[in-house]
Image: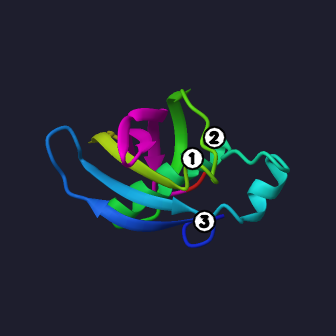
């Protein structure tokens, strides 16, 4: 299931700079049905949705769909409440190919106007094919 275009939309792409392979500013859709179930009256963004967004955004940057194959680290340091934090910044701080055609990435999810507000850190290995 692709989340881009319904659960969130891409608002902009960040230029590659020191310490940044690529990045994106996105806007969550607080009215999406996922938030009505997670949790009614007190919506929060599921961690698995943030991980899926990382895979989709890396695929957007790499020019092909990518899928999570393994999770080395997933650290959730803050709750993303879509009514309070509808805008998010995904910063890919590292990318490296693997011997078997995968892509190792490290990504941070922050508030775009407050990069010190860290919601999540991921270290994932992505592949072009689902398992």
**Residue drawn at point x = 18 percent, y = 52 percent:** 16
Q: CA distance from mark 3 to mark 1?
A: 12 Å
Where residue 50 is drawn, which disc sits there?
A: 1
* Circle nearer the N terminus (3, 1): 3
**Residue drawn at point x = 32 percent, y = 53 percent:** 23
Q: CA distance from mark 1 to mark 2?
A: 5 Å
Q: Nearer the viewer, residue 122 or 113?
A: 113
Look at the image and give the residue range highlighted in magenta.
Answer: 100-129
The spot of residue 40 in percent (x, y) is: 85, 50
Left or right: where does residue 17 sit relative to residue 95? left
The mark lying in front, picked from 2 and 3, is: 2
Is residue 16 located in the magenta-colored stretch of the structure?
A: no
The mark lying in front, picked from 3 and 1, is: 1
Prevailing secondary structure class for the magenta stretch in the rendered image: strand
Q: Which residue in the structure is indicated by mark 3?
A: 2
The spot of residue 58 in percent (x, y) is: 39, 54
Residues tagged 1 and 2 counted as in contact (Cβ below 8 A): yes
Q: Which residue in the structure is indicated by mark 2?
A: 47
Element at label 2: helix
Q: Is residue 127 above or below residue 72?
A: below
Quadrant where the N terminus sits is: bottom right
Callout 3 environment at 10 Å: few (<14), some (14 to 19), or many (20+)? few
């Amino acid at each position: 299931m692709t989340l881009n275009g319904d659960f969130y939309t891409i608002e902009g792409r960040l230029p590659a700079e020191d310490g940044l392979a690529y990045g994106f500013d996105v806007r969550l859709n607080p009215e999406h049905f996922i938030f009505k179930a997670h949790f009614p009256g007190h919506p929060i963004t599921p961690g698995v949705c943030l991980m899926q967004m990382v895979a989709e955004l890396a695929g957007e940057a790499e020019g092909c769909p990518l899928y999570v194959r393994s999770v080395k680290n997933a650290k959730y340091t803050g709750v993303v409440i879509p009514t309070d934090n509808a805008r998010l910044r995904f910063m890919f701080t590292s990318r490296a190919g693997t011997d078997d055609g995968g892509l190792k990435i490290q990504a941070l999810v922050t508030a775009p106007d407050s990069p010190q507000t860290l919601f999540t850190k991921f270290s994932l290995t992505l592949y072009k094919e689902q398992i």
